[in-house]
Image (tube, rainbow, N blue to C red):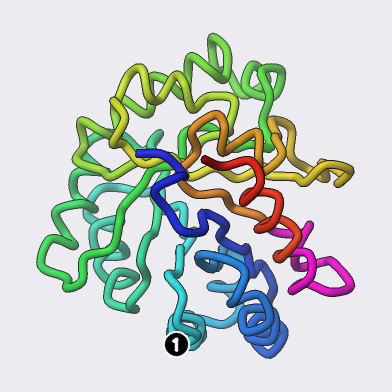
């Protein structure tokens, strides 16, 4: 599976505790993007009803929950978020295969069943940061291990940086979903991200879904920023 199979692979990250602002941006960018993402700040501040409000905008919603706990706790949380109508949510692959399998099994009878993906290595981390927390080997090696573990646990794909897509494809095959944050259009500041690529570079690398936040949401005109990315992708994608 590649980004070319999606009419528009861009999901906009609505990472704000302001529901009115999130809804305004969501409606403004709706004609130019393929989906919306709500993260921990949004969910923690506003709760499940606000997630439902974003779902009602009418685009697929990625709930960036990053669950990481004992298997029973994550299974219960997974089922709860799946019932909100989101199209996709995630857990941390470093929670282990039993935790991921429990989450996958907990949502089997939810209709429609959302995609369940796993975070490999946060795009804010580089090799030095991983070494500081005791992780041996490179970020690429860790992504490879965790992607294989996620697939063994019955998940649909992973979150990884665009730099690791080829590794994920090698280990998990072409149909394993790759969701790629750390997307920065040419000329944008990287912010707290370390392993970044432009939208067109990430699509060329084989990303299925591109998560774009501040380059759109912090723009003076979010709709125009989203449209610009869509136009860039239309010129570079087959």
- Which residue in the rendered view is the most extreme toward the top? 137
Q: Nearer the viewer, residue 202 or 159?
A: 202
Relative placement, left or right, of 33 versus 183 is left
What secondary structure predominates along the stretch shown in magenta?
helix
Label 1 SS? loop
Residue 21 position within the rendered picture, expressed as x and y whole percent measured from the top left: 72, 84
Q: Is residue 178 magenta?
A: no
Query: What is the span of residues highlighted in magenta in the rendered image?
Result: 213-225
The residue depicted at 54 percent of the width and 9 percent of the height is 137
Residue 105 at x, y percent in the picture: 14, 54
Q: Nearer the viewer, residue 70 or 223?
A: 223
Q: Quadrant of residue 148?
A: top left
Q: Which residue appears at 68% of the width and 90% of the height?
A: 20
- Residue 220 colored in magenta in the image: yes
**235 on left or right of 78:** right
Up the image or down, 34 lies above or below 177; here it is below
Q: Is residue 50 left or right of residue 109?
A: right
**Who's the residue at 44% across and 19% down the image?**
167
Image vertical order of residue 46 relative to residue 40, above or below = below
Q: Quick check: 154 left or right of 213?
A: left
In this view, 99 is above or below 168:
below
For disc 1, the marked residue is 56
Q: Position of residue 81 (x, y in %)?
A: 34, 70
Residue at 60 percent across and 36 percent down: it is 202
């Amino acid at each position: 599976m590649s980004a070319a199979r999606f009419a528009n692979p861009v999901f906009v990250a609505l990472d704000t505790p302001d529901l009115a602002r999130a809804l305004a941006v969501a409606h403004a960018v709706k004609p130019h993007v393929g989906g919306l993402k709500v993260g921990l700040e949004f969910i923690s501040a506003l709760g499940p009803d606000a997630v439902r409000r974003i779902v009602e905008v009418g685009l697929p919603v990625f709930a960036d929950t990053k669950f990481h706990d004992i298997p029973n706790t994550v299974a219960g949380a997974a089922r709860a978020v799946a019932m909100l109508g989101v199209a996709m949510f995630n857990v941390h692959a470093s929670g282990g295969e039993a935790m991921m399998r429990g989450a996958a099994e907990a949502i089997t009878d939810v209709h429609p069943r959302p995609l369940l993906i796993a975070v490999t290595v946060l795009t804010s981390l580089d090799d030095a940061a991983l070494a500081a927390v005791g992780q041996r080997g490179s970020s690429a090696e860790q992504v490879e291990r965790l992607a294989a573990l996620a697939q063994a646990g019955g998940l649909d794909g992973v979150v990884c940086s665009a730099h690791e897509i080829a590794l994920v494809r090698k280990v998990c095959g072409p149909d394993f979903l790759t969701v790629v944050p750390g997307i920065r259009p040419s000329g944008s500041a990287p912010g707290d991200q370390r392993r970044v690529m432009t939208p067109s570079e990430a699509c060329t690398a084989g990303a299925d879904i591109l998560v774009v936040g501040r380059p759109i949401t912090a723009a003076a005109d979010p709709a125009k920023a989203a449209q610009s990315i869509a136009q860039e992708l239309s010129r570079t994608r087959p």
